[in-house]
Amino acid sequence: MHNPYIPLLTEIKDIVSENKVNDLKTLELVFKKEEDYKAFTYIPGQFAEISLIGKGECPIGIASSPTEEDSIKFTIKKMGSVTTAFHNCEVGDIVGIRGPCGNGWPIDEMKNKNIVVIGGGFAFSTLRSLIIYMLDNKYRNNYKDITVIYGNRDSGEVLYRNDLDKWKKRNDLNVILTIDQEEKGWKEKVGFVAPVLKDVSPSPENAIAVVCGPPIMIKTTIAVLEELNFKDEQILNSLEMRMKCGIGKCGRCNIGNKFVCIDGPVFSLAELKKLPNEY
Ligand SMILES: Cc1cc2nc3c(=O)[nH]c(=O)nc-3n(C[C@H](O)[C@H](O)[C@H](O)COP(=O)(O)OP(=O)(O)OC[C@H]3O[C@@H](n4cnc5c(N)ncnc54)[C@H](O)[C@@H]3O)c2cc1C
Ligand code: FES
């Protein structure tokens, strides 16, 4: 068995700058060894500990879907020392990966349900993974109606434009984009995610809402979902606690008796309400 502390080696195949201010980059990585790629089986919503020699390691959600074969993607916001080192990387550089870590979105429990995906800002990455997975020919029939509401501060912050363009052309999902304020040339919605969700008013009947974004967006969105009669069990969220080992050994990420790195990062609101308010 592979030692979970030893990173698998990958090489950067491509780097995409995702936003106008250039503090969000998507790195596409390919495994150096075919057997490592085969062993790295993940589901949407999981994350990995990714590292650069001499710079450090950090947990990052997997932005690609397992249905996108041959490579794996991470969208990284420049925050501090390690994420800045990732931003300074070039194609061909070596990146270590430990994982996949965490539970991921419950793609089996979500089967035969209407799925409402609600994202804000750059926390959209594991939602991208989920949407691409659900839209794959092999899996699309497993899910009923798919609604995506994706909000950003301004149009320059909208990630994954190629994917959004493709999704908008499909008739088997409803994609609603919004930005906080009016902008010349913007033809989609204007306003925060929560009021837009209220306008769209998805039915809670046989539905699951998957919510990812900054804390204020999560709070206001959950309030609207509750108004729409979504139950706590029907609302899923992914937490970003500080982490170290990513495998349930160091105790860095625990909330009460749960380790976010192995019991999460995905929790239902019902599960979160049973935990101490430390997240
Ligand atoms: C499960 C999980 C998934 C994540 N997915 C992504 C992702 O897809 N893309 C992405 O860009 N980031 C993601 N993060 C956050 C990312 O791990 C941190 O931004 C990163 O560890 C910061 O490292 P650094 O050395 O660059 O910054 P540091 O020098 O350690 O810190 C710089 C700043 O970042 C803040 N910070 C550090 N760690 C975190 C954290 N875990 N959460 C929030 N703020 C933090 C610090 O308070 C400080 O203000 C995820 C975190 C977790 C736990
Ligand atoms: S990060 Fe070590 S126990 Fe979760």
Image: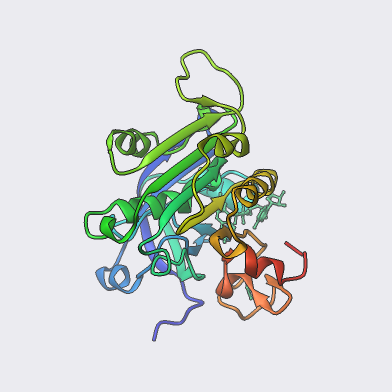
Report the side of 269 relative to 176 (left or right). right
Report the side of 192 relative to 171 (left or right). right
The location of residue 177, given as percent across then percent down, is 47, 32
Please identify the residue farthest to the bottom as the structure is shown.
1
- Is residue 246 at least partly visible in the picture? no
Q: Is residue 55 above or below residue 169?
A: below
Image quadrant of ligand 1 equals bottom right
From the viewer's side, name the closer residue of 35 and 116. 116
User: At 60% across and 30% down in the image, what residue appears?
Assistant: 153
Please identify the residue farthest to the left as the structure is shown.
137
* Location of residue 264 by image quarter: bottom right
Q: Is residue 271 above or below residue 12?
A: below
From the viewer's side, name the closer residue of 272 and 12. 272
Q: Quadrant of the N terminus?
A: bottom left
The location of residue 200, given as percent across then percent down, is 51, 37
The location of residue 111, given as percent across then percent down, is 37, 64
Report the side of 29 relative to 276 (left or right). left
The location of residue 263, given as percent across then percent down, is 57, 74
From the viewer's side, name the closer residue of 12 and 273. 273
User: At 45% across and 59% down in the image, what residue appears?
Assistant: 206
* Location of residue 136 by image quarter: bottom left
